[in-house]
Image: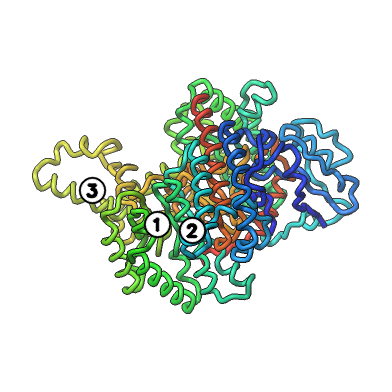
Amino acid sequence: MLSLGVDSSLFCRGNIGGILSPRLPSPKKLIISRGSPYQNLGAVLPTQNASSAISRCISTEGQGVYGSPTMIWPENGEDPFVQAGLRQESMPKHVAAILDGNRRWAEAHGKDLDYSLFCQGYMSLAHLCIKWGVSTLSCFMFSTENWKRSKEANDLLFGQFQKYLEQSLEVFMSKGIKVTIIGEKTRLPKDLQEVIKKVEEETKINSTLELNFAVSYGGKWDIVQAIRSISRKAKAGEIGLQDVDGTLMDQQLSTNGLGVPDPDMMIRTGGDQRVSNFLMWQMPHTEFYFTDVYGPDFREPHFIDALRRFQQSDRRFGE
Amino acid sequence: MDEHHWINSTEPFATAAAATTTTTTKPLLPFSRLLISGGAAVLVASETCRRGRLLLLCPSASTASPAFCEAFEMEKGKDSRNTFISTLGNFARKCLFGILSVGPIPDHIAFIMDGNRRYAKRRDLEKEAGHKLGFAALMSILRYCYELNVKYVTIYAFSIDNFKRCPEEVKSLMELIREKIEGLIREESIVNQYGIRVHFIGDLELLDEPVRLSAERVMAATAGNTRSVLSVCIAYTSTNEIVNAVHLACEEKWDEFRILDSCGGAYGLTRYVGNGENGENFIGLEDIERHMYMKVAPAPDIVIRTSGETRLSNFLLWQSGHSLLYSPSALWPEIGLRHLVCAILNFQRDRSYMEKKKKIL
């Protein structure tokens, strides 16, 4: 059985004097099984080396080369859900993710800003969702507020995202991933819009995982566009104003096409503890999981930790 | 309770210098650190006197309560004006707030008061007792907020989803709410002490008539207060608020349309109503926000939810898009000064980080 106990030394280490960071450190003691040689690994390792720390915790084989994903493989044929301390029947159906922290990660490693890691991060997360039985993944690529960034950074992101979509089309088809893009697509560059249309069209028959990218998306924008389409219908006499309720709003929002429109859990990396205008209407009862780990460092053990946190929460929905 | 994924409230409030940047990219403002450590050193004596008595009054279930903050807390639910030590504690608290005010203080804090029933269960009390203790905790927190000059405070008193609870519980909660609302109009209440204007936010038609009438009385009685604002969300959900705003915005726009049409002013209408094909996209963000229940306050700077649960539960979804979310593991009746101070320190650190981020952008 796996343990991830609260270790008070995690608070004392790395903090001189008294004012301890009120933000809890990201889970550094990761999946450690009883009797494992890694059980006594108690050192607090800095965030930047998180992935190598994870690989040392997990596998004796792979070298944990920085940047290569490390996955959990069941030992001795044990059920991976049991090994990870998860219940298969209560996995979240829809996970939303904001893999924040790419720029800070690039600065910390002396690298140039490169959004391909951002896209690859979401791709790895998609693979993890397929492995652990999550049916929908929503990824926040670009928000309506991000238009304030410099044109060069935005063009870089759009260019790399377009390349990523084109190159990953085969993977989407082989893994059964249905790709949808939500957001104000009309503001995007024309060739990106073409690629998006093509990828959506070709992957629409897939059904293993719904991979939903939010590009040029804002929660408020989504609600306002839903309201506009409702008001158009009401003005045209198709519906009465008294028919406007929560269900009708759900049907007009961008997430209407998804099997499960409301996320059960939202993961945000990079340390910021806020929603940042992502999926507002759709997240009334979503469990949030915040971690200090930067996006490119987010790996399977962090994901399992998030899933465990989700399963431990008592979702009462008001009752 | 597995606490380690959210901000933990077990850390001592302050003894000395730096928070490192190992896990955070937002170091505490250096000047604040110095002042806090100096202030903490000065206030040790009053803590020692009060601690024994306070621990009896306010037992913390699982957290190692930071000694310094407990010293500054008033006795929950009691008027603390009459004892020397209470006076000393009040003075110490004012010094602490003075230190905190060196950095930015949030304009608007929102609270989700979760954990009353669990608190009562842990102490083998009735659920009503849990809610009463929760109310006492609320009064303390409100005093702290208004002493700190936080202008807007919003609390999530009762959700529309809570009507699904068993009818006896809903009835007793409504009775407690009505009783406490009536208490607000009394002379010595917190409302008059701090010049608070009270708003009751939500679909008040869903409430029983006695509760609704009390709420309307309090809103009318406090309409002239201008120093600070308390928004009590009762029979509220964010989705209900948005749908209501849609109804009102659509009706308003169509009324305008009809008036202009009847005056023969329709020719310029498509230009007047704005962009979009055939002038149909005439509802905008401002139209929705103008009809929200929560137009009485700006967006919250911090949303605090107790009991360690990390969700919004249909509270201020529209308004909290950029708010800092903070979730101490303490249950609502256990909430104290230290949690508020931690939340504000976090906010100050976050604010300086966001300023830097804006400059980079």
**Which amino acid is tagged 3?**
Lys
- Report, in whole angstroms, how far the alpha carbon at label 2 lies from the one at label 3: 44 Å
Return the disc, 2 or 3, that comes first in the chain's sequence: 2
Q: Are marks 2 and 1 on the same chain?
A: no
Numbered disc 2: what chain? Answer: B
The image quarter in which residue B41 lies: top right
Whether residue B160 appears in this view of the structure is yes
Q: What residue is at 57 percent from the left and 29 percent from the top?
A: A162
The three-letter amino acid code for the residue at tag 1 is: Leu
Q: Secondary structure at mark 2?
A: helix
Q: Residue at x 31, y 57 (%)?
A: A239
Q: Place residue A128 in its image quadrant.
A: top right
Residue of label 1: A248
Residue under pointer 2? B140
Image-quadrant location for residue A53: top right
**Which residue position holds label 3?**
B253
A311 on left or right of B168: right
Task: Point out residue A27 in the picture as x, y percentages from the top left corner.
Answer: 72, 45
Q: Residue furthest bottom?
A: B168
